[in-house]
Image (cartoon, rainbow, N blue to C red):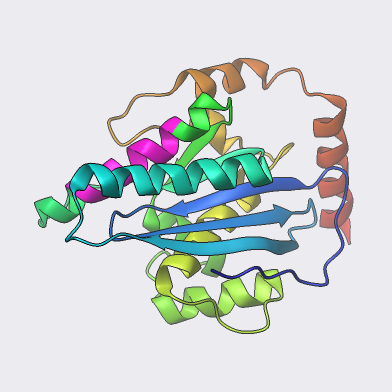
């Protein structure tokens, strides 16, 4: 577990995002604070591991409790999670879906919106290349968050990258509201996403402030 903070300043309209790279053997969690000018800082990162020797129910509960603890401690504005796809390796796909489910449920129980992002979408947002390798993603994550070194292990890198992707592509006041528009891996939209879409026409004062700050940053 790492607690890493950059020297970047924070703002009243910063967006706190918890990124998750789901998995049952290793589940990556990263909490970042993103600013309207696209800068960010790391508040926390950790990888929760479980052993295949443990009972399945115990493993799932461990992931759930880890998610609950972080959600309660950091109270993120949104939870961004890597979207689960079917895989030729069925056991791996099922385990990833199980981990995703309990993390999503923990967020929903606290009224925290959930957004899904595909691996290629995350890579494209962070590196401008949807087929970038792990090293390229790690280097960009370290640069964006002003980390003292490359994040390790890869699950931590991916959790950071998911959070950054969401912050850059769907921050409060962003041109495109990914939280409202992103579909689940079954193609459905959550109630939270539908509510966000309905609210998109009337922004709060904080959202307007974020949008104004983004516009000023774009003109520099």
Q: Is residue 30 above or below residue 198?
A: below
Position of 195 with respect to 129 (left or right) is right
- In front of the other: 54 or 10: 54
Residue 93, image x and y in percent?
19, 50
Farthest-out residue, bottom: 149
Please tell me which residue is depicted at 68% across the width and 70% down the height of the picture. 4
Question: Residue 101 magenta-drawn?
Answer: yes
Image location (x, y in percent) of residue 31: 62, 55
Left or right of 167: which side holds 208?
A: right
* Rendering coords of residue 168 (x, y %): 64, 52
Span colored in magenta = 94-105
Identify the residue shown where x is 37% and y is 37%. 102
Question: Does residue 212 lie above or below 33 as drawn?
Answer: above
Q: Residue at x 31, y 36 (%)?
A: 185
Name the quadrant of the C terminus: bottom right
Taking depth in this image into account, of 207 and 8 the one nearest to the observer is 8
Answer above or below: position of 99 versus 152. Answer: above
Nearest the camera: 181 or 78? 78
Question: From the viewer's perspective, is residue 29 above or below residue 97?
Answer: below
Is there any visible trace of residue 182 in the rendered image?
Answer: no
Rendered image quadrant of residue 120: bottom left
Q: Residue at x 43, y 35 (%)?
A: 104
């Amino acid at each position: 577990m790492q607690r890493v903070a950059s020297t970047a300043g924070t703002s009243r309209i910063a967006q706190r995002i918890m990124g998750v790279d789901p998995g049952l053997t290793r589940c990556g969690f990263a909490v970042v604070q993103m600013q309207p000018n696209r800068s960010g800082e790391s508040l926390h990162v950790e990888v929760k591991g479980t052993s295949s020797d443990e009972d399945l129910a115990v493993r799932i509960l461990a992931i759930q409790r880890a998610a609950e603890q972080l959600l309660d401690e950091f109270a993120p504005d949104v939870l961004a999670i890597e979207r689960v796809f079917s895989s030729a390796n069925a056991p791996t796909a099922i385990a990833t879906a199980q981990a995703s489910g309990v993390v999503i449920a923990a967020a929903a129980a606290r009224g925290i919106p959930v957004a899904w992002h595909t691996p290629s979408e995350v890579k494209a947002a962070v590196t401008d290349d949807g087929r970038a390798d792990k090293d390229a993603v790690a280097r960009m994550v370290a640069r964006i968050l002003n980390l003292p070194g490359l994040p390790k292990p890869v699950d931590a890198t991916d959790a950071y990258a998911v959070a950054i992707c969401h912050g850059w592509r769907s921050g409060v006041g962003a041109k495109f509201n990914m939280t409202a528009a992103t579909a689940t891996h079954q193609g459905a939209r959550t109630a939270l996403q539908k509510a966000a879409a309905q609210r998109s026409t009337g922004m709060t004062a904080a959202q307007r402030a974020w949008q104004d700050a983004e516009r000023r940053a774009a003109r520099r």
